[in-house]
Amino acid sequence: MAVEIQGAEAARPWLDRAGATFSTVVDSANVLGEVLGYKVIPNGILLDEVGAVRFHKFGGFSVANSADVDAIERLLAESATGDAAKAGALSPARTTATPAAQRVTALRQGLDLLHAGDREGALRSWREALAADPENYVIRKQIWAVEHPERFYPTIDFAWQKEQLALERERERRLAERTE
């Protein structure tokens, strides 16, 4: 599954680059993030044939990371032998929903506004969601991707993200000091 607030077309280059030969669902409202409780991407989540989460790594997942690939290969090997219980022991995911209806609504509203051509309205909606949950990097990165697409497409500029986060954190700190 790809998490891409801007929709399937924005996710397509990443899937093409990865050479994905399987169907991919695009979560454009971060519903999975709300259900599983993650606030950062990229993630790796593997489901079995009945939809049970058998592996997850929230933040920093990469098929270029040998430990991540090894975990997936172990899961696939254990699933192939029919040892579902052992496969499930790799990394059981948290399955409790988080109370985040307002953020989900703001993300969806922003997406609807973006698709309707109201870029500024979308950004405003997402900024409101981010103000309610400043540690949510899924929301933060969607704002960045709309405001600075050159930093995300065709490749993600992680150094820029780190600098941008530091600038925003400082700005948020100063604002908090003024309102106290």
Image (tube, rainbow, N blue to C red):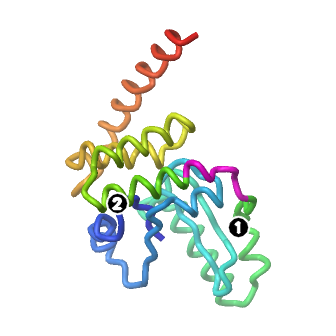
Determine whether, in the image, residue 150 is placed left or right of residue 115: left
Q: Residues within 10 Å of mark 2 (few under 14, many from 20)?
A: many
Amino acid type, label 1: Leu
Residue 70 place in picture, x, y as percent: 56, 68
**Residue toward you, 174 or 62:** 174
Residue drawn 43% across and 78% down? 24
Q: Element at badge 1?
A: loop
Percent coordinates x, y for residue 15 in the rendering: 33, 72
Q: Residue at x 22, y 57 (%)?
A: 154
| Vertical arrangement, residue 56 with respect to residue 133, above or below | below
Residue 99 included in the magenta stretch of the image: yes
Q: Residue at x 30, y 36 (%)?
A: 160
Name the disc covering residue 6, or none: 2
In the picture, measured across the screen, residue 36 lies left or right of residue 6, that is: right
Q: Earlier in the sequence, mark 1 or mark 2?
A: 2
Residue range (magenta): 97-103
Residue 90: assigned label: 1
Look at the image and say whether residue 9 sits in the magenta stretch. Answer: no
Which amino acid is tagged 2?
A: Gln
